């Protein structure tokens, strides 16, 4: 009991997996009472940006004295203690002063929730709601925290409106913007935020956390951690929804087939991918990420780094490809796939982008 409490006191109960540098930075800001009014959290998909934002909101509002053991005097657990009512309710999205805003958040003007669900942009109404809330005193916490998830999806006028709040932030308000990269939000916004960069998490760290926090058997934890490619959010999602793993495996089979296929089949695939991109952008971009993983696995096998490959269940076919392709083939294919991804992100015509990729990917 005493050991557990001492543990809590020394580190705080941050739920974020890995990314110690970001945690240390935010912890330091709280301890030195130099918390900025605006942060921009950037990093790869599902790496833990939103979890870190919630951790930070908990740390800012934590009432650790509620749970400090009698006789400890001034000694209290470091925030977020994970045990006080603020920590608990913020984690359950049930705390009036911490709000998460996404494109699907209902505005005060929405008459039905379905309208919000269909929206893909963060419009000005959401920012106006934020502003009228921000000028009020915190209701139950020490400070108000607004987390704007996918801030890269703000409309131009929403961004302009938010800029005014960032220029003159109310004293007890903190705004955390979440985006894939700093240049995915307007420069005027990014320049007013303290940048916090999250990085891919090493597979051992993800595996350890799956074992400790989710009771996953070691072998399974290691497989999931490798498959997650540094994104703990994916590993946890796959734990709750094993179909994600099947989808990944099917995608790998498809890609191995395409590397062996002739041009007509490749163009059929480009056509299917174009349709998929129009239907479900995230799923098509996922498939592109898988291409890079497969190519990386082949490169690993060419260098006898068998223990590092992600698709260990396809090792025989991948080894064959590793023998038949040259290092240059793999490098050229990887840059073609990356170019396709960049082109799609900057709204290129998808059919052209996928066709171009099919012409560049080597054939065996
Ligand atoms: Zn707490």
Image (spheres, rainbow, N blue to C red):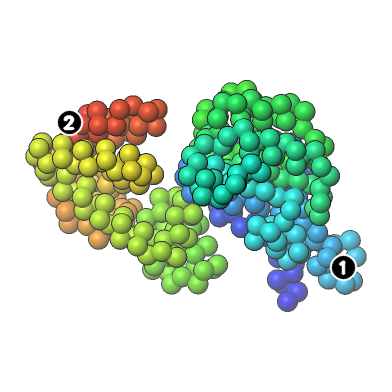
* Label 1 or label 2, whichever comes before in sequence order: 1
Nearer the viewer's eye, disc 1 or disc 2?
2
Find numbered disc 2 in the image and state the secondary structure of the residue it sits on. helix
Find numbered disc 1 in the image and state the secondary structure of the residue it sits on. loop
Q: Which residue is mark 1?
A: 72
Image location of residue 333, percent across then percent down: 24, 34
Residue at 64% in and 41% down: 109
| Tag shown at residue 359 | 2
Instruction: Tell which residue pokes out farthest to the bottom in this image.
Output: 1
Q: Is residue 336 visible?
A: no
Q: Are marks 1 and 2 in contact (CB under 8 Å)?
A: no
| Closer to us: 82 or 92 | 92
Image location of residue 275, percent across then percent down: 27, 40
| Closer to us: 331 or 112 | 112
Q: Which of the 4 image quadrants contains residue 179?
A: top right
Q: Is residue 347 visible?
A: yes
Instruction: Tell which residue pokes out farthest to the front in this image.
Output: 111
| Closer to us: 269 or 7 | 269
Quadrant including the C terminus: top left
| Tag shown at residue 357 | none
Q: Which of the 4 image quadrants contains residue 276?
A: top left
Instruction: Tell which residue pokes out farthest to the top in this image.
Output: 188
Q: Up-down: is 74 above or below 218?
A: above
């Amino acid at each position: 009991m005493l050991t557990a409490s001492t543990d809590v006191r020394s580190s705080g109960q941050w739920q974020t997996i890995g990314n110690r540098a970001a945690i240390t930075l935010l912890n330091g800001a709280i301890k030195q009472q130099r918390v900025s009014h605006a942060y921009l959290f950037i990093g790869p998909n599902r790496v833990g940006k939103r979890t870190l934002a919630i951790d930070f909101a908990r740390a800012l509002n934590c009432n650790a004295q509620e749970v400090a053991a009698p006789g400890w005097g001034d000694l209290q657990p470091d925030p977020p203690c994970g045990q006080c009512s603020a920590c608990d309710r913020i984690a359950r999205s049930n705390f009036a002063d911490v709000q998460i805003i996404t494109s699907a958040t209902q505005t005060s003007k929405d008459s039905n929730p379905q309208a919000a669900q269909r929206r893909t942009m963060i419009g000005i109404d959401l920012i106006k709601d934020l502003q009228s809330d921000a000028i009020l005193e915190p209701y139950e916490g020490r400070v108000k925290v607004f987390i704007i998830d996918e801030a890269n999806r703000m409309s131009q006028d929403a961004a302009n409106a938010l800029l005014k709040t960032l220029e003159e932030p109310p004293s007890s308000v903190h705004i955390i913007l979440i985006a894939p990269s700093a240049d995915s939000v307007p420069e005027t916004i990014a320049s007013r935020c303290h940048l916090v960069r999250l990085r891919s998490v090493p597979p051992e760290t993800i595996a350890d956390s799956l074992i400790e926090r989710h009771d996953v058997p070691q072998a399974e934890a290691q497989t999931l951690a490798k498959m997650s490619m540094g994104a703990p959010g994916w590993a946890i999602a796959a734990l709750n929804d094993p179909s994600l793993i099947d989808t990944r495996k099917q995608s790998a089979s498809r890609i191995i087939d395409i590397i062996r296929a002739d041009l007509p089949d490749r163009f059929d695939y480009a056509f299917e991918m174009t349709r998929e991109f129009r239907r479900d952008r995230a799923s098509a971009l996922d498939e592109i990420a898988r291409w890079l993983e497969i190519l990386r696995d082949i490169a690993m096998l060419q260098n006898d780094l068998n223990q590092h490959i992600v698709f260990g269940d396809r090792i025989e076919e991948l080894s064959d490809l590793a023998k038949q392709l040259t290092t240059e083939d793999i490098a050229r294919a990887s840059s073609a796939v990356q170019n396709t991804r960049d082109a799609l992100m900057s709204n290129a015509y998808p059919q052209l982008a996928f066709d171009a990729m099919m012409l560049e990917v080597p054939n065996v």
